[in-house]
């Protein structure tokens, strides 16, 4: 009875909701498949007798692209895990937004393969295009995350107990940062130097790894100079 009364008191009590178990299980399965697809791009290089080591070293850029994307997918999975912990239930609209997040994840193997090929066999123009493509895919991936947090802001009844509206509002800064800085990394790689663009992408992956549990609203307030 107490639980029912609590539901009636929620401002979004009329929402048709369902448990998050299926969303979580399906999402975890997708991330597992994406990481598996990444490793399929690693192949034994062609070589002549006695030149295997040299051939393997020549593929070093491909291995770098694989490691970057493996870590990237892992970071996305950690962020997604933290995202699901913010909600007590899901809706049809929120499930569609989650599919958008997964779409961004399943695309990753393609720009990874392009980047590996360009770094290993391409010239500077190819590397510019590959880094710009990777950054574009990463920037577009931030869009559904922004939609997810925006939806939660409008429907506080979906928040898990202890999750404040202020915390959700603060987290919207992270996908905004992703859209802007991944885009900037792509422009940097295209117009300036592909290596600088790739470094910018790696820095952003590290940023999302460090903040996978979310930005702290109190810390942001202090940094804005509230005088405390």
Image: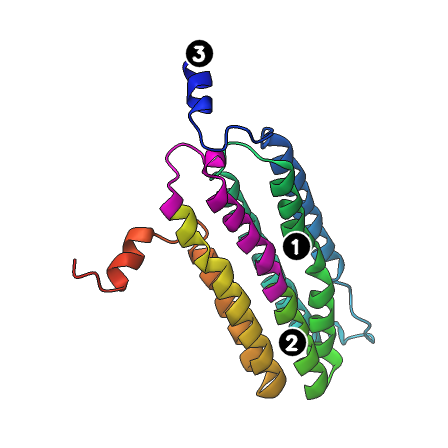
Of marks 2 and 3, the one in the foreground: 3
Q: Which residues are magenta?
A: 139-166
Q: CA distance from mark 1 to mark 3?
A: 41 Å
Instruction: Say whether residue 71 is left or right of residue 37.
Output: left
What residue is shown with label 2? 132
**Image position, residue 149 (x, y; %):** 50, 49
Q: Residue at x 21, y 60 (%)?
A: 226
Label total for image: 3
- Residue where numbered disc 1 is placed: 105
> From this viewpoint, is residue 85 visible?
yes
Under circle 3, the secondary element is loop
The residue sitting at the left extreme is 228
Measure how far apart labels 1 and 2 are at the Cα level. Answer: 17 Å
Q: Position of residue 130 (x, y in %)?
A: 69, 76
Q: Residues within 10 Å of mark 2 (few under 14, many from 20)?
A: many
Tell which of 15 and 63 is nearer to you: 15
Q: Residue at (22%, 64%) from the top-left corner?
A: 225
Rendering coords of residue 65 (x, y %): 64, 68
Seen at 16% across and 57% down, the residue is 228
Most prominent secondary structure in the magenta stretch? helix
Query: Can you identify the residue that label 3 sits on?
Result: 1
């Amino acid at each position: 009875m107490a639980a029912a009364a609590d539901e009636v008191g929620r401002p979004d009590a009329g929402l048709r909701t369902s448990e998050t178990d299926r969303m979580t299980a399906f999402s975890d399965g997708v991330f597992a498949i994406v990481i598996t697809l990444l490793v399929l791009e690693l192949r034994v290089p062609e070589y002549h007798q006695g030149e295997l080591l040299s051939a393997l070293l020549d593929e070093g850029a491909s291995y770098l692209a694989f490691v970057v994307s493996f870590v990237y997918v892992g970071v996305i999975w950690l962020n997604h895990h933290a995202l699901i912990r913010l909600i007590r239930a899901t809706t049809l609209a929120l499930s569609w937004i989650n599919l958008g997040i997964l779409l961004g994840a399943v695309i990753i193997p393609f720009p990874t393969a392009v980047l590996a090929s360009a770094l290993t066999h391409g010239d500077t123009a190819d590397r510019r295009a590959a880094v710009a493509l990777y950054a574009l895919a990463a920037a577009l991936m931030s869009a559904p995350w922004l939609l997810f947090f925006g939806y939660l802001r409008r429907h506080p009844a979906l928040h898990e107990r202890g999750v404040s509206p202020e915390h959700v509002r603060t987290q919207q800064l992270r996908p905004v940062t992703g859209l802007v800085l991944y885009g900037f990394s792509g422009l940097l790689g295209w117009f300036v130097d592909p290596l600088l663009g790739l470094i910018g992408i790696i820095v952003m992956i590290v940023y999302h790894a460090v903040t996978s549990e979310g930005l702290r609203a109190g810390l942001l307030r202090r940094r804005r100079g509230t005088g405390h």
